[in-house]
Image (cartoon, coloured by chain):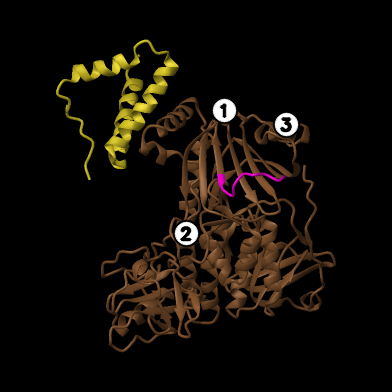
Amino acid sequence: MNTRKALYQFGYRRCADQDRPSPAGHPVVVVGAGPVGLCTAIDLAQRGVPVVLLDDADRIGEGSRGICYAKRTLEILDRLGVAEPCLEKGITWKIGKVFQNNDLLYAFDLLPEDGHKMPAFINLQQYYLEHALVERAATLPNLEIRWRNKVIDLQRRNDGATLTVETPEGSYNLDADWVVAADGARSALRGMLGLSFQGEAFEDRFLIADVKMKGDFPPERWFWFDPPFHEGRSALLHKQPDDVWRIDLQLGSDADAKAEQAPERVIPRLRQMLGHDDFLLEWVSVYTFQCRRLERFVHGRVVFAGDAAHQVSPFGARGANSGIQDADNLSWKLASILKGEAPESLIESYDVERSAAADENIGHSTRSTDFIAPRSAQELRFRDATLALARHAPFAKRMVNSGRLSMPSRYDTPLSTPDVDTWSGSAHLGAPLPDAPMRDRNGKSIWLLEALGGEETILHVPNGAVPPNGHRVLVLGDDLIDEHGLFAKRFDASPGSTYFVRPDQHLAARWRHAAPAMIESASRRMRGFEGGPA
Amino acid sequence: MSTLVTESRLADPDRSYRALIEAHRGLSDEDSAALNSRLVLILANHIGEHAVLQEAIALAKQSMEAVGDAPR
């Protein structure tokens, strides 16, 4: 059943490329206008790279789909100019509660400290995010979205690829120096390259239902093991905007997907859970899931991102979040290569860094799934033993796994310059910088990550010596004032401390005292010129 | 990092073994299995080292292979 109509409809428009005698050439063609394709296209366009974005559909808004967006994703969206509408519309939350039967086993706070621009998480229907991204895309003159443009063939060349694109008015060819395949879990491009998508499939079926109701549940993530309203299984309740609640019910491996989606089956289940039937069913779907990935994300000039490259179970909100982090990682690299600022081999670091992130995400989501949906009597026994012990011993509480929520990856990467000094604080080499509230040179409030934007930046704490040279240098106390001392604390900063930040806001190098040659070498290394992957 | 100790460490192994037996006495197979699951988790946490736990798992599995391979 799928009662929701498309919320946003876009028109197909004939483009000039369709009337050319020979294929038009473009530096980058992105395939798939989901969150990942849109973020990649916007990021590239913001970096001055002209982008064509193709999508086979012409509408968004069927089903809420991905609903949880994590802090790091919101920071990326902020850089792309869409965090504001998302935060405005979204439900901000940071508390999760885990119940067994009627009892609260434990609660967690995902962002226990202040001084970050973005919250731990927001919940937002995917169509609102996509809509905000499409609106942002429309303001970028070098980004062209072509709806109802379906890629039906891809021929690879050494210096790019030729795509055959089908439209309502026939097909045409396009030449691209680079193709970004962000065409989702069922990626057609993956099929065109004959790539296998390997991993583990899980048998348990889950029912996902969006119900509209006025509820007095707080904006928290509530997860039940063995709830009284759904004995022996698990359930998840999450608030979305518009008084819509996401309900996720484990059905088991022998459930009949079709029968379970019938309103006469769904409504009594929900009535039992909610204790009333004062709700409207907005969207229902039954799903199973896979944890799998492509062996490589880079195939010559064709680069895979998001679900097209890797797929996880929904526990932990690692699908859309990791896909948007792929976009964040890929865009500056592609832009640097296209502008001749980095060697083509820099793209290998996308494969290295995002493969490791995918493995981390698959690992977490597989382990969560093992705990939530045990597959044998003994697996169930271990799970229940953990839940029982959790009431008595703290160690068992930590083992209770209702989904480990998406955290950004810390890249162990050849682009980083290994630390030679010792550092404490919450900044880590290879990880995105922790945010901090600052003031700019005019005394205006600004967040550290806002000040960084998407540019390679050196942050320098003065010590009386001449500040370093670089593409862009921000001097603490001068360009950025650490009013609350949180920068100093989070970065373990002392006079002379110098931080070298990548265009995706990950920390590439840091020194207590940096000589110009060290910075120059770190900058070259970050762009893949030396110490890079073979 | 330590490794799994397989030399005898209990002062009175018979007594400790007996404690395990007594804990299970009178339990159904299902309840015994539930008790063992709890014990494994508690003891794994007490060991506190993933590598040692892996060694323990390997030893347990190895001892099962030996039974399976024996002539019947």
Which quadrant holds residue A327? bottom right
* Chain under numbered label 2: A
Question: Regarding mark 3 in the picture, which secondary structure is present there?
Answer: helix
Q: Which residues are magenta?
A: A213-221
Of residue A120 and residue A355, the one placed in the foreground of this image is A120
In the drawing, does residue A128 fall left or right of residue A306?
Answer: right
Q: Which residue is mark 3?
A: A268
Q: Amino acid at mark 2?
A: Pro
Find chain B in the image and tell me its colour.
yellow
The three-letter amino acid code for the residue at tag 3 is Pro
- Nearest to the observer: residue A71 or residue A520: A71
Residue A103 screen position, x and y as percent: 51, 33
Q: Amino acid at mark 1?
A: Gly
Chain A shade in the render? brown
Query: Would residue A473 be counted in the magenta stretch?
Result: no
- The quadrant the C terminus of chain A occupies is bottom left
Is A132 drawn above or below residue A274 in the view shown?
A: below
Foreground pick, A156 / A136: A136
Circle 1 crowding by C-alpha within 10 Å: few under 14, some 14–19, many from 20: few
Asked where in the image residue B67 lies, by quadrant, the reply is top left
Q: Nearer the viewer, mark 1 or mark 3?
A: 3
Measured from the top left, where is residue A57 in percent x and y? 76, 60
Circle on res. A426: none
Q: Residue furthest bottom?
A: A466
Residue on which disc 2 sits:
A408
SS state under label 1? loop
